Image (spheres, helix red, strand yellow):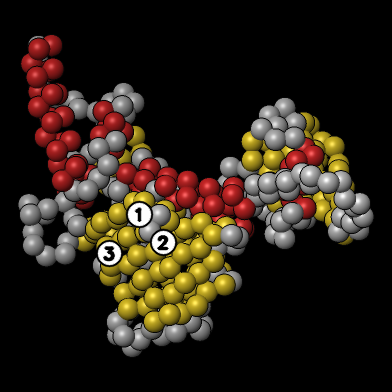
Amino acid sequence: MIASRPEKTVANIGESNTAFCASACVYAYLGAKYRYITPGEKLGVHKFYSQEEMSASEAMSTSQDLSAIILEYIKSRDVDPGFFSDIVSASGGSITWVTPERLLETGVVSQGVSETIVEYKNLDGMIYLRVEQDALVGRNVMTFSCGKYGAHGMAFLQEPPNAFTGPPLFHSSGQDLTIHEYKFIKHGDGNTILSYIVTPANAAILAGNSSAGIKVFNQDYSMSYGFQGSVYDPKIREMVDGCMQNFFRSPPLPPAATTPQPITPTPPAFSMERAANLDILGGDLLANGIRNISLDECERRCMNSNQCVAVSYVTGKQWCWPKGDSRTTINRQGIISSIKRLN
């Protein structure tokens, strides 16, 4: 009944300190077009059960019928069919409380969003990622593509009446990230268009969360417009981290000269100071690091990057982690950390 309403229906879990939604409530909740949940509140599911006596064949037939009905209903509400596995795999006869991350990932909780589309596009041979969100606040789009210095893109945001001009911020799984390099291309005519560059530090967070959105704030950060929260999709991690992997890739060696030429070696501007059994916490410039390279190569890539100030290297896995911050360290076996020093 709720799903069939033509109006923009809204459901929210969290009107009191003890709010929760479980069992049949979940299916009523899914009927709303825009579904919210207050942090700290809960949504729970359980397996099918009946108080009526049934034969094994009757139970199997009923279970199959229910599965088909519920699965079709879930899909019709733009919820990932994978959520059905949370229902049928719930433990015993008790309620299983689904994590907030899982609710967002499967689309059960939309937080004011009715549709998201994340897809790769090809523009004259250039591959870019388009992230589109249709929400109560409007239809907004952002893109990511790879450039010389990592990821960059553009945002197309639906403006409210009397749109204000202020700093744009990335939003990723509850975090607001300062965009240091951006430019407004259009503003004040119903749509904001802006271009931006993703710094390595922001790229690591966006890729690590596999989520992204953009908001434009007023000068005192009391109001904003743009994406409703952030869009979660593994392709965001794949695209943004892939751009940064290219940024940290070693440059090709110069071609060998046919005639030997005298070379005056130029002393390197930086060197790396190693410390054994030391790990640098946080500050990752890549969400997945760089695998299967030597410590020497790991250090060389850091020295070639203006953003990198240190590396932590997992010796047993040949796993390199470029760092944008080296202030917090911890003793840890099997890890070598190198700090970039100016010669």
Q: Earlier in the sequence, mark 1 or mark 3?
A: 1
Residue 55 place in picture, x, y as percent: 9, 11
Q: Earlier in the sequence, mark 2 or mark 3?
A: 3
Are there few (<14), some (14-19), or many (20+) residues within 10 Å of tag 3? many
Q: Please identify the quadrant where the C terminus is shown.
A: bottom right
Residue at 27 percent across and 42 percent down: it is: 80
Taking 272 as reference, is 202 left or right?
A: left
Q: CA distance from mark 2 to mark 3?
A: 17 Å
CB atoms of marks 2 and 1 within 8 Å: yes
Name the residue tied to disc 2.
Answer: 143
* Viewer-closest of 94 and 209: 209
Q: Amino acid at mark 1?
A: Lys
Taking 231 as reference, is 342 left or right?
A: right
Residue at 82 percent across and 50 percent down: it is: 339
Residue at 54 percent across and 49 percent down: it is: 241
Quadrant for residue 158, please give it: bottom left
